[in-house]
Amino acid sequence: LYKKEKFSVDAEQLRVFFPYEQTLKGMFRVYEEIFRLKIIETQPNYKWNDKVTLHLVYDSLSGEPLGALYLDMFPREGKYNHFAMFPLISGKQLPSGHYQRPTVALICNFPTPGKDKPSLLSHDNVETLFHEFGHALHGILTRTKYSRFAGTSVPRDFVEAPSQMLENWIWDKTVLDAFAADYQDSSKKIPQSVLDKLQEAKKATIARHYRRQLSYGLVDLGLHTLSVDEAKAVDPVKLSHQITENIYMKPQDNTSFVGYFGHLMGYDAGYYGYAWADAISADMATVFEKAPNRYYDKKAGMRLRREIYEVGDSRDVNESIEKFLGRPRSLKPFLNDLGINK
């Protein structure tokens, strides 16, 4: 509501520019071009629901098959109700010398299409689609010898960086003009002025977002770095309230955020990685921003494919990042994104 009133941006009005099928095909075309890929829909021998689709991914230059992607994109009763990429078969070198092609699945819950109306995505939905597809590419494009190091089997505080970087594409006017058009009148595109207002609105609340992320990360670290004796004595609700109030905002009385903080299990002192991955991805995005063809630059795209996606965790990710950047890492791009320019 604040963004709508302050910046005259109604995100709901942008849905007409993002019908699901059109957006999906447009995203595929973008990454087919910069990563030298060919993505072809095929009929699977097996699928767990009639709405699931299967897409085979090939190297567009050699014709070599690289992997497969299942898409399960709309909600239904009993289905996982968030957005995620799940690796089904990991890439690895087989004893025969052949490479085991990875298979991944994107599980999403975008608006269900109507009888006479397509599924219309919000700009946030499109950002999520590009993000999750980044995870899918990380899994599919891997070429590591061992599955332990394949795809997204990288350190927790790096795994989100390659996918978060792909979110930058949906803020670029040239990229959006290639597929984002009013589904009732394809001549209508999103004006640059609207994108500028969206960026302003994003920056207006970004400090609040990172205060939230930092407080959650500190709660996670605070609970997971206790000794056994300290853990027995600590009041987790009191600890989480103290941190949240100091960094973010005062929790409501008689609430227990820590009781439903799902990332405490599974991330285990790794929640800070979301904010850290943002810092890494902002730095990585500068390679495209400075490239001759920006977000359509094939040379930058192939560097990302070779130096990040293919190697996975088979070498230290810090080395991979610097090989992709061609220089030491920097926090300046991230601070610029926050509006901190000094």
Image: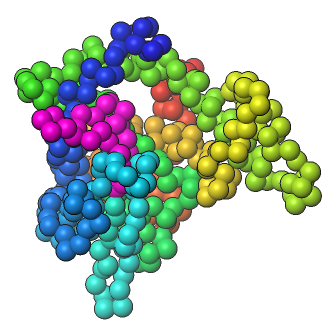
Give the percent coordinates (x, y) of residue 265. Answer: 64, 56
Colour option used? rainbow
Residue 299 seen from this side: yes
- Quadrant for residue 146, please give it: bottom left
Q: Residue at x 15, y 39 (%)?
A: 115
- The residue that appears at 24% across and 18% down in the rendered structure is 192
Left or right: 232, with 101 as reference point: right
Where residue 183 appears, as percent x and y from the top left, is 12, 30
Residue interval drawn in magenta = 106-131
- Magenta residue check for 113: yes
Q: Quadrant of the N terminus?
A: top left
Q: Nearer the viewer, residue 289 or 43?
A: 43
Vertical side of 215 occupied by 58: above or below: below
Instruction: Decide if residue 233 is on the left or right side of residue 205.
Output: right
**Residue 36 picture quarter:** bottom left
Point out the image quarter for the C terminus. Answer: top right
Q: Nearer the viewer, residue 185 or 51?
A: 51
